[in-house]
Amino acid sequence: MRLVDRYDAIVCDLDGVVYRGDPAVPHAVETLAAAGVPIQFATNNASRPPHEVAEHLRRLGLDLSDDDVATSSQAAAWVLTRHLEPGAAVLAIGGQGVALALRESGFVPVSSVEESPVAVVQGYGPDVRATDLAQVAYAVQRGALWMATNTDHTLPTASGYAPGNGALVLAVGAAVGRGPELVAGKPDEPLYLMCAERLGVDPERVLAIGDRLETDIEGAHNAGMDSLLVLTGVHGIEDAVAAPAGARPTWVARDLRALLADVEELRATGDALSREWDRRDQGQGSPDGAGTLPPELAALVH
């Protein structure tokens, strides 16, 4: 049995899994095209509208609709439908994806505290200014419900790591003395649960794929999904060995080709990881590097 055949659907991260910046990760497009199950492409990026992300994926060769992309802005609006009445005014801070998601969910995005917003959605945008953060602080101090699209502290760019939305949320928190009541993106569960609802599949029948343990994999754990860590992005096998219980992947593989591989071919890696986690949990320490890893894991490092 192929790994993908164990599941009814996939939720797949993007940067580091499907593409790196603009170009595709090797083997990603052809593997996902051959997977044979519904896929939601989920991103913590709140600034880009879904159609821009979908167009990027179509340029790489994937056949999908705009509705196959799920953003943390959409997840934030999805959560707010459970807290607010339709037509409520919501302060929208971030890129154009934030206001668009709110509008599509029946809310009225506003840009000033003087428009009496009952909630705030704070997301990243390249043009977010100090005056925008001040509006968030003012609204929160007046009692507005505060939701962050995501709390990623850094944003990878071609020049290095820039402050991400999490850093901007911390700036507001320093002014108001607390953090947001709600967070939509990974590692919190709303983004993944929204994807499961769109797919019409119970979370336990969905495989979440990502390259970051503290967002993609921990988010899958929080949502009750199995997870696949691919070693094409941020984290490597040593990171997986050292991961705390809530950020441990179900499966680990070099790249997305594992989806089409026989499950038995992946079990050796999974069993070796389980043994190392047992050692760590029992206080016996953990390997310091590739040289001390079991052969099944050391092979993934090279």
Image (cartoon, rainbow, N blue to C red):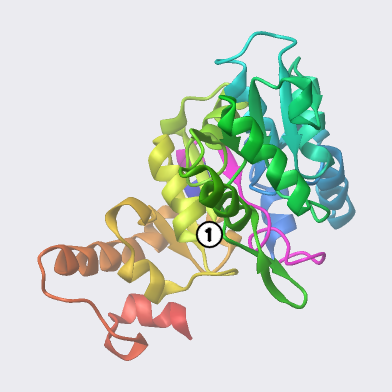
The residue lying toward the viewer, choosing from 280 and 299, is 280
On screen, residue 8 versus residue 270, left or right, reads right
The residue depicted at 80 percent of the width and 27 percent of the height is 110
Q: Is residue 60 above or below residue 89?
A: below
The residue depicted at 32 percent of the width and 91 percent of the height is 291
Position in image of residue 155 (x %, y %): 66, 63
Residue 144, quarter of the rendered image? top right
Position in image of residue 34 (x %, y %): 69, 48
On screen, residue 197 versus residue 301, left or right, reads right
| Residue with the mark numbered 1 | 258
The residue lying toward the viewer, choosing from 58 and 152, is 152
Based on the picture, tell me whether residue 19 belongs to the magenta stretch: yes
Q: Is residue 237 above or below residue 200?
A: below
Position in image of residue 139 (x %, y %): 64, 31
Residue farthest toward the bottom in the current orientation of the protein: 291
On screen, residue 297 versus residue 281, left or right, reads right
**Start and end of the magenta stretch?**
5-25
Which amino acid is tagged 1?
Ala
The residue depicted at 66 percent of the width and 26 percent of the height is 77
The residue lying toward the viewer, choosing from 146 and 213, is 146
Mark 1 Cα shell of 10 Å, populated few (<14), some (14-19), many (≥20): many
Secondary element at tag 1: helix
The residue depicted at 30 percent of the width and 60 percent of the height is 244
Q: Is residue 163 above or below residue 116?
A: below
Based on the picture, tell me whether residue 46 belongs to the magenta stretch: no
Residue 89, quarter of the rendered image? top right
User: Can see residue 253?
Assistant: yes
What predominant SS class does the magenta segment belong to? loop
